[in-house]
Image (cartoon, rainbow, N blue to C red):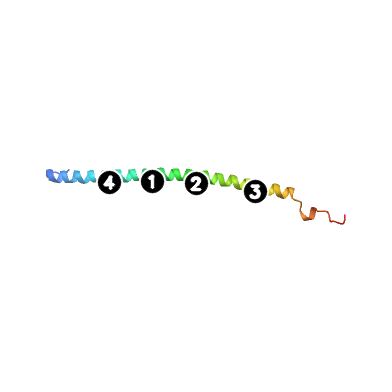
Amino acid sequence: MHDDDTPSDAAARLEALESRLAYQEHWLDTLDRTVAAQEKRLMQLERLNELMQHRLREQHQALQDADATTPRPEDEVPPHY
């Protein structure tokens, strides 16, 4: 506070500070909720990514197993043998 401030000037400055503080608290709460929602979404996406990778590995293994059990044309004996 300045020496030449009147009580009404000091009250106006205090009110302005309180207003700024309330505004900052509001945005801090908003940011906190946003970060929490993003964290939840990130966890969901990471889990989905894990499931998709697992499924792709299973499909890759199934294709390899199918290739191993399916006779290839070069492995077949011609009909005249």
Q: Secondary structure at mark 1?
A: helix
Please state the total of marks drawn on the protein image.
4
Marks 1 and 2, the one that precedes in the sequence: 1
Closer to the camera in the image, 56 or 14:
56
Q: Secondary structure at mark 3?
A: helix
Q: Contact (CB < 8 A) between labels 2 and 4?
A: no
Name the kind of residue labelled 2 in the image.
Leu
Measured in 3D between alpha carbons, the distance from the residue under mark 4 to the one under mark 3, in whole angstroms, is 54 Å
Residue at image point 73% right, 48% down: 68
Report which residue position mark 4 lands on. 23
Marks 4 and 3, the one that precedes in the sequence: 4
Report which residue position mark 3 lands on. 60
Measured in 3D between alpha carbons, the distance from the residue under mark 1 to the one under mark 4, in whole angstroms, is 16 Å
Marks 1 and 4, the one that precedes in the sequence: 4
Closer to the camera in the image, 9 or 3:
9
Quadrant location of the N terminus in the rendered image: top left
The numbered dot on residue 45 is 2
In-image side of 14 versus 27 (left or right):
left
Name the kind of residue labelled 4 in the image.
Tyr
Marks 3 and 1, the one that precedes in the sequence: 1
Does residue 5 show up? Answer: no
Q: Neighbour class for label 1 at 10 Å: few (<14), some, many (≥20)?
A: few
Report which residue position mark 1 lands on. 34
**x, y percentage for residue 38?**
43, 46
